[in-house]
Amino acid sequence: MSEHDFETGAIWATTQTNRGLGHAFDADGHALCSRRIRPRTGAQFSTRETLAQQTQAHERCLKKVAERAEAERLAAASPLAAAVVQLVEAADAARTAQAAPRVVEGVVVDHNGTAQGSRPSHVTHPDVAAARAALRPLRPATVTEHTEITEPDEADPTVRGYLVEPRGNGRIAAYWIESGLITSRKDRWNGVCVEILAKAFTDAGWRVEPHSLRAVFAWRPDASTTAQTEAQPTPPAPTARFMSGSRVVCGDGQERAVVGMTHRANEPARVVVAGGAEWIASECTPVPTCLHRIAARPDVSGDPVKVCTRSQWWRSGAGVFTDEGCVEKYDCAVQAANRAAELDAELNAEDDAAPADEPVHTWALICPNHAEQAAESCEDCTTEP
């Protein structure tokens, strides 16, 4: 005879040799304890219960135990399915309480300058829209145009979900953001999320590039086929080599520092920039540097990179000038130009008024005969007979 305990989940069964003495079994069929069973409905167990009836009771008990064990085995055998269920859960109460967002080509754009699943500037990009359609069941990350996802000190711990960035020609990079930072495949707890992104693209017919730890690089089905067909007739053009420490302008128009380059078989060379992101080398434009491998700031005047050279006749270096003359001296013209622009930027930040029409600090080559004068406008040289 058997009885199910709905409070503890155990199954009680009596034995023939000791009628009325029950044994509790857990979900794996192990005996837990024994006790006397009294019917809760008021009915009395028959002391003349046949062996066949007891056998049927035990068989029903064991069948329930086997069904529970099989259900637990199936649930444990699919960790990816469990992870997908967690990612598909609805957004938390704080986000559902906000006003209904505006949809632009499949990407949700909030009114406060944020977007879900991509940067606000990428919401209308066709490759991003196609990638979002492939990842539709998963959770997108809500980010702004300048949300930091690589620096732990500047990251927003509330940002969580996937982020898609276009790489041009039908190629995208998808990241999984956890606590505001990019997740690696080697992450013990959240690395499976990157695998889920790759599987979602593969199931949607995208071509996923292998051997990437921090991102999923994928090609749209039509763009991947077109790129391969066009690349077959002629070999690819040689790619420029980007040195570590130099700066490049990437495909999105942003200037970044170069960490190195990576090469894979039958794939275009890529430039690895600060933060771990990879860009196709042919889509990157090097920022000009001087002989000292220093790039000029965007707000400098003139062309200090062209002026800077080690083989000039003056050999007196360059300096930062004010109305009082030369205030700082450098061996590199680019260093002097960057320093002059930096000092003017600091003055404008401290002054509440509008910036001056003319810069306070300028850069110029130093006169080889008069260290306090600029070479092009030295007053002492022009007055000498």
Image: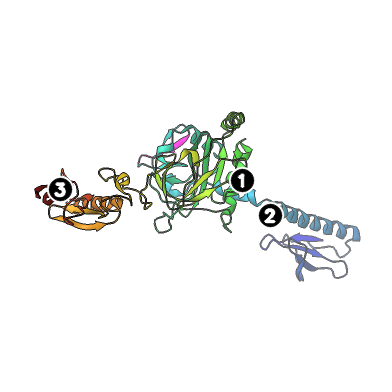
Disc on res. 82: none
Q: Is residue 53 left or right of residue 152?
A: right
User: Marks 2 and 1, how far apart in space?
Assistant: 27 Å
Instruction: Using the image as rendered, state which of residue 378 and residue 218 is in the foreground.
Output: 378
User: Marks 3 and 2, how far apart in space?
Assistant: 66 Å
Q: Secondary structure at mark 2?
A: helix
For label 2, the residue is: 76
Where residue 133 sits, quadrant-wise, is top right
* Dot placed on the residue nearer the N-terminal end, 2 or 1: 2
For label 1, the residue is: 210
Would you say the residues marked 3 and 2 are in contact, meaning their CB atoms lie under 8 Å apart? no
Q: Residue furthest right?
A: 51
Would you say the residues marked 3 and 1 are in contact, meaning their CB atoms lie under 8 Å apart? no
Give yes or no for residue 230 being in the magenta stretch: no
Callout 1: 10 Å neighbours few (<14), some, many (20+)? few
Task: Give the magenta-colored segment's residue range.
Answer: 106-111
What amino acid is labelled 3 in the image?
Answer: Ala
Would you say the residues marked 2 and 1 are in contact, meaning their CB atoms lie under 8 Å apart? no
For label 3, the residue is: 353
Q: Point out the image quarter for the N terminus.
A: bottom right
Position in image of residue 71 (x %, y %): 72, 52
